[in-house]
Amino acid sequence: VTKPLPNIIFLDIDGVICNPETCIAEGEIAGYNYLDPVSCRLVRRLCEEYNCRIVISSSWRKLYDQYALQGILGAACPSLGNYMYTDDRWKTPILSGCRGSEIKTWIDKWCSEFDNFVILDDDSDMEPLMDNFVHTDAYQGFRLKDFIKACEILKRKP
């Protein structure tokens, strides 16, 4: 029996699982140092229910390596970091241009290794991948309405 191919979550962090609402609630005035537990748990639920692996598309991929990010995700939400790739697939390439083109480059390279994908981001530069894009509110992050849209995308056959 062959294992089904995973689905991919292209995960931005700021504005998706890290938002000013949570940071201010935690006592922070400026900066983004707290991951939102609800947003993180909703992402984990996507991983559990739709056989997803996480690929980091966030600018955080320039600041931390895959093991640090896996630890950050795991500290924010038990087992969330376990869904992240830690091999060469762990992040989208850093290119000049829009995030959508970085994700498209990753997809072109690894297309035989996954079934479907969803992009979770508060930016909107995701052409030509808008059909698989969930646009989050930068101030609130990934919420129930976004989770429902992500589920609808992952249910579709690519």
Image (tube, helix red, strand yellow):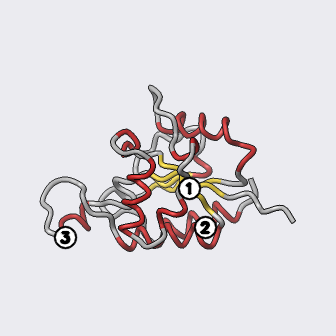
Q: Nearer the viewer, mark 2 or mark 3?
A: 3
Mark 2 or mark 3, which has the lower sequence index?
3
Along the line of sight, the residue nearer the viewer: 86 or 98: 86
88 horizontally vs 60: left or right:
right
How far is disc 2 from disc 3 in space, using C-alphas?
29 Å
Q: Amino acid at mark 1?
A: Ile
Residue 82, x across and y down, in percent: 52, 63
Which amino acid type is marked by label 2?
Answer: Cys
Where residue 21 sits in the image (x, y, percent)? 25, 66
- Identity of the amino acid at label 3? Glu
Q: Is the residue under label 3 in contact with that under label 2 (CB below 8 Å)?
A: no
Residue annotated with mark 3: 26
**Which structural element holds mark 2?**
helix
Q: Which residue is mark 2?
A: 151
- Quadrant where the image shows the N terminus: bottom right
The residue tagged with tag 1: helix, strand or loop?
strand
